[in-house]
Image: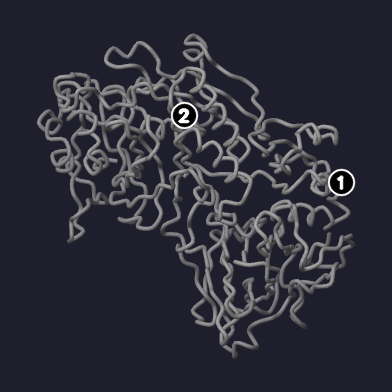
Amino acid sequence: MKLNYIFAGIGLMAAMTIGLTASAQSKLDLSALRKTAELRQSKQTRAAIADEVVPVMIQLVPGASQTDLMKQGVEVSNHIGNMVMASLKVSDLERIAALPQVITLEIAKESKPQMMHARVSTYASKVQGNIAKESPWDGTTRPFDKGYLGRNVVVGLLDTGFDPNHITFYKAPDYTETRVKLIVEFDASGKEVKRWDTPEAIKAYTTENEADPGTHGTHVLGIMAGAFTGKGQFVDYDHHEKDSIEGRSNGAPQGVCERIKTCAPAVYDNTGNEANIPYLGMAPESDIVICVGPLNSNTEIAAANAICNYAKSVKKPAVINFSLGQNFGSCDGTDGFSKAIAEIGKEAIVCIAAGNEGTKNNWISKTFTADKTKVATLLQAKFTDKDTKVTSLQGTALEIWSNTDKPFTVRIFAYDKDDMTPDAERRHELGEVSGATPEGKYIEGNIGTAGPCYQGAIVVTSSVMAQNNRYAATVKLPDNFWYDDTDIDPVIGIEIEGVEGQRIDLASDVDDVNLVNENNNKFETGTPDMSINNMACAHNVFAVGANVNRNIYGTLHKTGYKVSGTVGSYRTYSHMGSHNLGIWEIGGWTFVANHNRSRILCCLSKKQI
């Protein structure tokens, strides 16, 4: 196997490489290729990287068994179908990938955690029974002959920041019996390490995150299955300067008091007094399974499996939610997570956030034409501290995918953003990688006589990927990346050159990098157009997006509901919002909905309860 690298840095670096022809396929995914590249990068760090243990997902050929892996020293944590979750030393990645039983080997991808009009927009209250101010549990107010509140359904999720003993997860109307039936904890490889499966154990559980308890997971689960509609005192805020509302064409702010009057007149009439809180989840009578642990593709599959297994044990249908996301991936359903979750989707309803990046310009998609076979962009740090020499570019990565197995060329260059000379003189080539790049090519980060441009080593690795026979490349900037003092003011640029008819998709890390053109139309700026969550591209799942039209949030306290702050300065979030929610039944069908602080998009599942 041959890996293509660029090592752009200061000084000479010794390295070892192995061969991979342009037509061969790599069983390792891009993150694993990147790790093996780093393993060879430096004698000083090689030993530490070699001993690093990473969670992996391995796809086996039909008929192969996890026993075949265990004989090779692989510590298996979990499995579903022919997808095996395990942990490996970095030094063993290539050896295990080379086994004839292995189709692909991926390092588990890390995920990131990603409302007044929501219930009105989705008619949730009407579906649940025209919930009146007296009590949602009063059967006389329902237009149906039974309540559609998630009864006899198991809802489950993997998330972070849980308070499982919040009153909203107790059974209404007396709130003395918990609806949380099971809590399961996993390690990074997807191995179950502990479970809480009795009411006594669950009541004694505090949180999996003492430093940040009761945050994202509690919020998402409350949207999914919150049941508290007891009395509380509403606090009247006369005006909130940043509050906005759907349909206000002049963009004028609306006071919270006015908003409460619009959405919940019964509450407005009782402002300052106690009133029934009208905000509850989509499935307030459902049973709940909570999964905790590091957020990555291994733990996500392990959690989905555990939720399904519990639902089967009590002979109830399951609905699984992932308000989590990954910026990188092929987005075609061929990676290990997608294949495994597609199997889960045959047995349960799976909701996955489409993403929180609807306003982030961190993607470029380009189909090359006969007269334009190149695209270039510049990397701008999201933050930089010159005093401490810290920048978000340090250690950041990018991925580039072709739509076919045809190779493309990746060029790394430095661009002097402040120089006013012609473009050709402002751009300084550092090196390139392509299907024909000789192995072991090293490029110093120097710009002519100006001296070093930056410190550290940029790694570019490319291959045809075994998972889908598509050519792909990954670029990683060094962990100690910093621009050295030179006579120019450089930014790092990336150029991709392909052939007519070929499409490439470039993704950067939204938390680290902006894709910009520095006011030069020869470079492309990023767009949100490819901001779909890779997890949401699997088969047999619901990918759920939303439009946001408010930017304040409310907090339910012990005795009141009040507005607590803002979530940003923008009014709309028009592309791919996230936060999946909700499950309810209508005539044997199942509704799945998404919440993102205001507007919900609904999907009607064809899977019957």
Q: Residue at x 66, y 43 (%)?
A: 108
Quadrant where the C terminus sits is: top left
In the drawing, does residue 232 fall left or right of residue 65? left
Q: Nearer the viewer, residue 56 or 160?
A: 56
Q: Nearer the viewer, residue 236 or 430?
A: 430
* Percent position of residue 332, x then y: 56, 55
Relative vertical location of residue 6 with respect to residue 175 in this rendering, above or below: below
Residue type, mark 1 in image: Ala
Q: Nearer the viewer, residue 41 or 557?
A: 41
In this figure, which residue is indicated by the disc labeled 1? 47
The mark that comes first in sequence, 2 or 1, is: 1
Relative vertical location of residue 194 with respect to residue 370 in this rendering, above or below: above
Relative vertical location of residue 17 with respect to residue 111 in this rendering, above or below: below
Closer mark to the observer between disc 2 and disc 1: 2
Specify the quadrant of the image occupied by residue 193: top right
Residue type, mark 2 in image: Gly
| Mark 2 neighbour density, 10 Å: few (under 14) some (14–19) many (20 or more) | many
- Which label belongs to residue 98? none
* Percent position of residue 440, x then y: 86, 67
Specify the quadrant of the image occupied by residue 118: top left
Specify the quadrant of the image occupied by residue 513: bottom right
SS at badge 1:
helix
- All told, the count of numbered labels is 2
| Mark 1 neighbour density, 10 Å: few (under 14) some (14–19) many (20 or more) | few
Q: Residue at x 78, y 65 (%)?
A: 5
In this figure, which residue is indicated by the disc labeled 2? 156
In the drawing, does residue 182 fall left or right of residue 276? right
Residue sticking out furthest to the front: 63
